[in-house]
Image: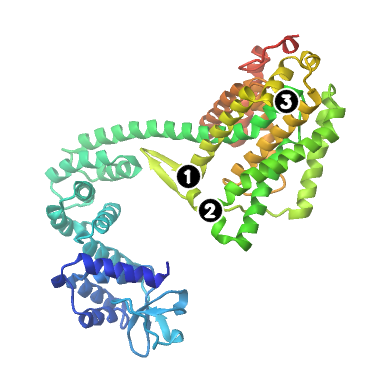
């Protein structure tokens, strides 16, 4: 939708919602709007006051555009206009009717200038006009704006609007705004301030805590105990929400660790291979996402929101095939020799990093978030970003799908048999080399899925996987080698523990503390939280 169409629709809605006597004639309103351009900032302030006094809601989008610094005027005619492009280069429309003005020259437009004082006046003016609007969403937005600014000069307008407001939700926001203003106003009575304290406390959050703390310094002695009590209550609530926020951060980090470690748990558990190139599978999955998005951007921009749905199976396929090639080309010759396997996969990780660097260069690549993964939302006192939220859900789905594969498919049954007793499984006719190749491919494919997820919370570079390989091994060893539920519990435990230790010890020291604790734990339980059972395991 273009800029001009937006204003046309807004004007139509305002026109339909307002009774006829609430609107000026087009020529009268046009004269008031045109008065915004000439003269000094003081003249513009007077012109804004005249628009507010008119009560015509069609002036609201004009004032909002002026507040954003995107209102223009034609020097020749002195007419104020809207334009659909920056710097006055684009379609020009009448701000009252929304009609195109083809006769005006694009190059003759100048921006209507505003300063900080005028912006404050504009915010107040918009609040005055929208707080009494017949449109519900406009009144709610205005009430929230007044609550945020808490300007005592708006108290009379707020009282008028509150007396006329029939919507309970909007009335509650207005009550909260009035209470905040009362606490900030030096002219408010003791009774009004005392009545405002529980209302502000009910708002909750840091803003309410800051408001009460600031009011305590100038509050009358009679209400200081009530304010102190409210501050203590909010501080207790905030501490509880801070704990919950840290738990969420830990779950978010744990979900990332789970995605990165779950493939390693399969290959390490079934095959006993210390795969130091596992992080590069994560990196290849992230670069697959980058390539998919670049192709979509250049050829099919309308499909960008579907880019992750396209990248997920491709990343799994690419990294899975690379994993099978690694197992068939290198790993199968080194079974039973863990040191040689470690050195070979470490060297392979360096080769893959250099190959990717030659293809994509060492520059950091940014992978975009689809619209449905952008932004954040609040749940009580928690601030949750959509990308982290969906990654947690995605990690849970991958984990559940892998459990189903291992429990209800033939390859899963064979993998479990080989894990528990490789020789017996081979004697029963299971082709253990095929199981090894499929297992390595499955683990690498899941690492590729982890790369897709990680591309949504950070930049992509050739050394992306190196930041997760050590943490992945810690998760696998702590949870129990080859045990998926152990990997799940280990990832969440380490993620949450890390987020509680990090604020006090710092990121580096926090990781060291976690590593020391894992070493001490392994001394007591060498097989981790959930040890695998089987004849070959127990031997």
Q: Position of residue 113 (x, y in %)?
A: 37, 76
User: Rounded to the nearest whole Å, what is the CA distance between mark 2 and mark 1?
Assistant: 14 Å
Residue to which mark 1 is pinned: 386
- Seen in the picture, residue 347 relative to 273 is either above or below; the reply is below
The residue mark sitting in front, 3 or 2, is 2
Residue 132: give x, y in percent of width and height.
19, 61
Of 244 and 359, nearer the camera is 359
Q: Is residue 438 visible?
A: yes
Mark 2 lies on a secondary structure that is helix
Residue depicted at x 65% and y 19%: 480
Sequence-first tag of 3 and 2: 3
When asked about the image quadrant of residue 285, the answer is top right
Question: In the image, is residue 242 above or below residue 298?
Answer: above
Marks 3 and 2, how far apart at CA: 36 Å
The location of residue 164, given as percent across then percent down, is: 13, 55
**153, 467: nearer the viewer:** 467
Q: What residue is disc 2 on?
A: 305
The residue at which mark 3 appears reads as: 268
Position of 369 compared to 299: left or right? Answer: left
How busy is the neighbourhood of tag 2: few (under 14 within 10 Å), some, or many (20 plus)?
some
Seen from the viewer's position, the closer of residues 317 and 65 is 317
Q: CA distance from mark 3 to mark 1?
A: 33 Å
Label 1, residues with CA under 10 Å away: few <14, some 14-19, many ≥20: some
| Residue 312 screen position, x and y as percent | 62, 44
* Rendered-image quadrant of the N terminus: bottom left
Q: Does residue 361 show up? A: no
């Amino acid at each position: 939708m273009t800029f001009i169409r937006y204003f046309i629709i807004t004007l139509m809605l305002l026109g339909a919602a307002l009774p006829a006597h609430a609107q000026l004639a087009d020529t009268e309103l046009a004269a008031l709007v045109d008065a915004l351009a000439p003269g000094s900032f003081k003249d513009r302030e007077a012109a804004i006051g005249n628009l507010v006094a008119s009560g015509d809601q069609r002036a609201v989008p004009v004032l909002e555009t002026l507040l954003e610094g995107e209102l223009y005027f034609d020097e020749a005619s002195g007419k104020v206009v809207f334009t659909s492009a920056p710097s006055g280069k684009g379609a020009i429309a009448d701000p009252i009717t929304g009609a195109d003005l083809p006769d005006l020259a694009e190059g003759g437009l100048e921006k209507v200038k505003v300063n900080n004082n005028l912006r404050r006046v504009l915010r107040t003016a918009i609040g005055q006009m929208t707080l009494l609007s017949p449109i519900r969403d406009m009144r709610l937005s205005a009430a929230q704006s007044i609550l945020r600014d808490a300007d005592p000069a708006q108290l009379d307008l707020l009282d008028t609007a509150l007396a006329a407001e029939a919507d309970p939700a909007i009335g509650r926001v207005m009550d909260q705004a009035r209470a905040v203003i009362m606490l900030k106003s030096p002219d408010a009575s003791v009774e009004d301030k005392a009545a405002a304290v529980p209302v502000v406390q009910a708002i909750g959050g840091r803003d309410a805590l800051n408001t009460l703390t600031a009011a305590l310094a100038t509050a009358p002695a009679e209400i200081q105990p009530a304010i102190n009590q409210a501050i203590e209550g909010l501080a207790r609530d905030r501490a509880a929400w801070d704990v919950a926020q840290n738990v969420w951060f830990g779950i978010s980090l744990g979900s990332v660790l789970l995605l990165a470690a779950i493939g390693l748990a399969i290959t390490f558990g079934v095959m006993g291979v210390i795969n130091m190139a596992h992080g590069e599978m994560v990196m290849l999955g992230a670069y697959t996402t980058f390539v998919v998005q670049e192709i979509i951007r250049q050829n099919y921009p309308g499909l960008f929101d579907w880019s992750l749905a396209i990248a997920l199976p491709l990343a799994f396929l690419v990294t899975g095939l690379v994993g099978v090639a690694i197992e068939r080309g290198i790993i199968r010759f080194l079974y039973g020799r863990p040191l040689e396997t470690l050195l070979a996969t470490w060297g392979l990780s360096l080769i893959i990093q250099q190959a990717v660097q030659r293809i994509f260069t060492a520059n950091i690549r940014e992978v975009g978030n689809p619209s449905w993964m952008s932004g954040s939302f609040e749940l009580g006192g928690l601030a949750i970003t959509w990308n982290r939220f969906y990654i947690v859900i995605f990690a849970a789905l991958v984990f559940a799908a892998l459990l189903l594969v291992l429990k209800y498919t033939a390859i899963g049954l064979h993998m479990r048999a080989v894990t528990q007793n490789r020789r017996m499984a081979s004697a029963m006719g299971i082709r253990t080399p095929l199981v090894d190749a499929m297992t390595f491919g499955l683990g690498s494919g899941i690492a590729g899925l982890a790369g897709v997820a990680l591309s949504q919370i950070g930049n992509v570079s050739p050394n992306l996987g190196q930041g997760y390989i050590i943490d992945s091994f810690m998760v696998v060893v702590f949870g129990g080698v080859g045990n998926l539920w152990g990997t799940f519990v280990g990832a969440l435990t380490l993620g949450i523990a890390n987020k509680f230790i990090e604020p006090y010890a710092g990121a580096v020291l926090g990781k060291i503390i976690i590593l020391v604790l894992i070493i001490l734990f392994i001394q007591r339980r060498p097989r981790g939280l959930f040890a695998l059972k089987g004849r070959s395991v127990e031997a």
